[in-house]
Image (cartoon, grey):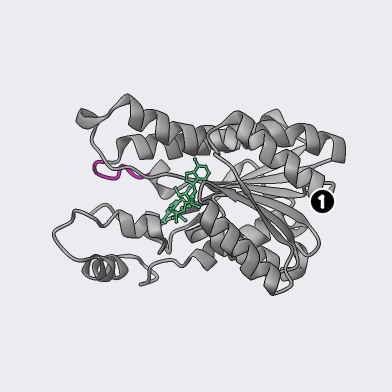
Amino acid sequence: MSELIAGKVIIITGGTSGIGEACVRHFSNCGAKVVCASIQEKEGGALERELRGLGREVSFVPCDASDDASVRRFVQVAVERHGRIDGAMANAGVWKQGKVTSATRGDLDLLMGVNVMGPVWLAKHLVPIYERQGGGVLLITTSVAAHIGFPAHVLYCASKAGAEAVVRCLATDHAGVMRVVGLCPGTIDTPMLAASCAGWDKPKEEIYADVRKRIPVRRIGEPMDVARAAAFLLGDGAGYINGTSLVLDGGTMALPPW
Ligand SMILES: NC(=O)c1ccc[n+]([C@@H]2O[C@H](COP(=O)([O-])OP(=O)(O)OC[C@H]3O[C@@H](n4cnc5c(N)ncnc54)[C@H](O)[C@@H]3O)[C@@H](O)[C@H]2O)c1
């Protein structure tokens, strides 16, 4: 499968932690030229040095995915470095708990700014490049939160439902130019998942053990589960998959609600 993205230029936001970091490692291991971005400059520099030391073509660009100008610069740098972009992954995401009664303008701006507008800004700056090149791919990391009413997650769920809508709209608006696919993970073992365990009445290990028992495949997902699927979706072998999302949840959404 790895040969499907070998030699391709792939850019990714949120590439310095969890799912995004696994994607950078996996895509570059498959022979892709990867340009990754995030707000974690120290981690980005370290990842770039580590993977270049292994002979991989990886570079890091500091970028705020919620900022139009910052994303424009990220895309420009990638094109200047490699001359083209074959695939992109809007993966940067933020998580915040809270019921509607505690919602603030700041929470709304943060969640919508990164989780919805992040993919929008990336698409905005990719489309002219894909038009010039004759096509390209955009993956957007959504979440099962788009489909499940997680308790006390109203704004996060709304932002991920928004991201799913962005997948469909971009695929129709830019038909023939950009293939757009959502990656819709369930429970994946990342720093974001660990952070979501704070404030519970049990330690993280106990929460994970309970969650493992409930997921039909009986394990929590690994970032590499998402990275392998992403590499396939970015490749030409996935050329007929468009305007939809691939759910990677170990069967969670198939469970009955009791
Ligand atoms: N972990 C899960 O269980 C899970 C489930 C479903 C969906 N997701 C989604 O997967 C994506 C990756 O999450 P993760 O679990 O790897 O989390 P993570 O916290 O480990 O990584 C998030 C990444 O996004 C980056 N980021 C955050 N804000 C940014 C901004 N403004 N600009 C640029 N980069 C920014 C961070 O620097 C980091 O690299 C997110 O979109 C998340 O919502 C995660």
In magenta segment, residue 255: no
In magenta segment, residue 148: yes
Ligand 1 within 8 Å of the CB at mark 1: no
Rendered position, 171 above or below 93: above
For the C terminus, the image quarter is bottom left
Rendered position, 141 above or below 121: below
Residue at 74 percent of width and 46 percent of height: 78
Q: Nearer the viewer, residue 228 or 107?
A: 107
Residue at 66 percent of width and 56 percent of height: 233
Residue 10 drawn at (x, y percent): 71, 53
Q: Decide if residue 204 is on the left or right side of residue 33.
A: left
Q: Which quadrant would residue 147 be assigned to in this image?
A: top left
Residue at 26 percent of width and 52 percent of height: 257
Q: Nearer the viewer, residue 256 or 165?
A: 165
Q: Decide if residue 112 is on the left or right side of residue 26.
A: left
The residue to which callout 1 is attached is 82
Query: Which range of residues does the magenta coloring cover?
Result: 147-152
Residue 136 drawn at (x, y percent): 76, 44
Residue 234 drawn at (x, y percent): 69, 55
Which residue is the extreme one toward the bottom?
54
